[in-house]
Image (cartoon, rainbow, N blue to C red):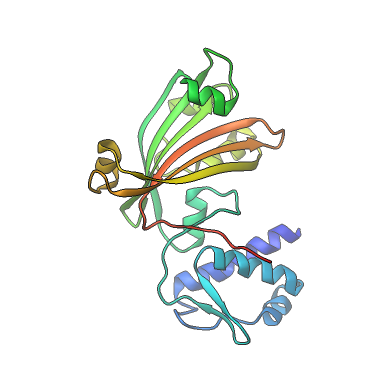
Amino acid sequence: MAKSALYHRIQGDISASIASGEYAPGERIPSESALADRYGVTRMTVRQAISGLITKGLVTRKQGSGTYVLRTRQPARALNQLTGFTEDMTEQGYRPTSRQLSNTEEEAPEHVQEWLELNNGAHVIRLERVRFLDETPTALHLVWLPLWLAPDLVRRSMDNVSLYQTLEDEFGIRLSTASQRISAVRASAHEAEVLKVEVGSPLLYTEKITRDENNQPVEFVQSWATPELPIWVELQR
């Protein structure tokens, strides 16, 4: 089994154990050496898997003591991984759902043309969805895709569907890299209505461009998230 697959398996197994209560809040999980023996991998692979769990806000390391499940846990999006909302939240033990607000074909607005490197007059798919965690609206996503990329997508419902998995499994698009910029904004009337917050409430606004394995822009996303969905990044020196 490839190293990356083992890394994800270890991370997924520990996430599931935390979600099920096998590893309770405040409890120490097995040591790196014990996990390395269990999975037949190096401690470095285990350490990378645990680092991912730290980034997701599931566990914390205590110097000289071990790794412990956080007592108070909140969902988080990682900056150092190219994963979708559904994948992120499921791995953390939450029940993510989504409701499609609109899914249309239209001529790309000027700013979308620039992000997706499209010619004038090019058509795109405009997909707007609200994302829920345990039935609480948490984020509003406005996704723009070149029409040629997945033309059939505009004729289907994207309720409770992973867009990344759909693009990879059904359309053969291999996502590779992404760049994003993040800022704080105040909720407009539309965002406030969708996310059930007051107009002017603080939101985390993100613009992200995703590229495939050929460095072709395939997705431009604008998202507005409530403060209950922070972004985590792990830094090393």
The x and y percentages for residue 233 are 56, 59
Q: Quadrant of residue 21?
A: bottom left
The number of callouts visible is 0
Q: Quadrant of the N terminus?
A: bottom right
Q: Which residue lies most toward the bottom here?
A: 65
| Coordinates of residue 193 in the picture (x, y in percent) | 24, 41
Residue 116: x percent and y percent?
57, 27
Q: Give the residue displayed 48% in from the left and 49% down from the top.
A: 85
Above or below, 56 relative to 62: above
Q: Is residue 148 visible?
A: yes
At x 52%, y 63%, the residue is: 56
Position of residue 92 measured from the top left corner of the image (x, y, whole percent): 48, 63
- Is 115 or 173 nearer to us in this picture? 115
Write down the quadrant of residue 172 in the picture: top right
Q: Is residue 10 visible to us here? A: no
**In terms of depth relative to the viewer, which is nearer, 166 or 70?**
70
Q: Is residue 145 left or right of residue 7?
A: left
Residue at 35% from the left image edge and 52% from the top image edge: 226
- Quarter of the C terminus within the rendering: bottom right
> Please, which residue is most extreme toward the left here?
198
189 or 72, which is in the foreground?
A: 189
Above or below for 128 versus 49 = above
70 or 204, which lies in front? Answer: 204
Establish if 150 lies above or below 99. above
